[in-house]
Amino acid sequence: MTQNLTTAQFVADPAPFKIGFTLKASSEFQAEWLTPTVWGHTAQETAERGAELLTALKAVGLIDLTSKAAQYTRDQYKGGGGSPSTGPKRFEGGRVVSKTSAGLDDDQCEHGRKLVDKGSWSAMFCQAQPKGAQCEPLWKQPDGSFKAK
């Protein structure tokens, strides 16, 4: 079990061991995540605290509550900001990219696209490497759609 340490010892000797957890609601990028962290003065203490924390998160209902709060927040969203055509996200090559080629059914890009919004203009750029192998950019139109020039 853990040692009984005084408050003065915690202040004088910061816990050198740390465990961080990532609990994802699904494999989709937009799903909610919980990222609790525990510290300890020994590896054993840190592992015990980690098990204690995960057990408490479940027992108290924090995981379920987080999911319900995230759904409530999504239900309240009225739109605005960002691009509605970016579609679901996934990780590819260390970057977040659109799952369905920027959500455009007629887009032939197989590499994924990245939205660049500079205020006065927006475009979706192919993420292929090297740059010479990239597909043609799609430029935001007045109606909000994206098209090649």
Image: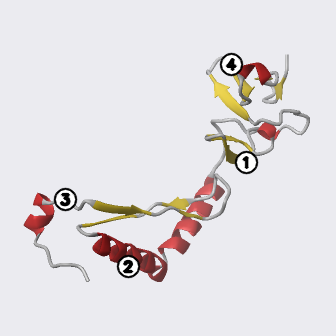
The disc placed on residue 14 is 3
Residue receiving disc 4: 121
Q: Are marks 2 and 4 in contact (CB under 8 Å)?
A: no
* Image mark for residue 52: 2
Measured as percent of width and height from the top left, residue 121 is found at 68, 19
Residue depicted at x 28% and y 74%: 45
Does dot 2 land on a helix, a strand or a loop?
helix
**Identity, as a three-letter code, of the amino acid under mark 1:** Pro
Numbered circles on residues, count:
4
Q: Mark 3 and mark 2: span between their CA atoms? A: 20 Å
Q: Are marks 4 and 1 in contact (CB under 8 Å)?
A: no
Q: Is residue 48 above or below residue 37?
A: below
> Residue 9 falls in which quadrant of the image?
bottom left
The residue mark sitting in front, 3 or 4, is 3
Earlier-in-chain disc, 1 versus 2:
2
Mark 4 to mark 1 CA distance (whole Å): 22 Å
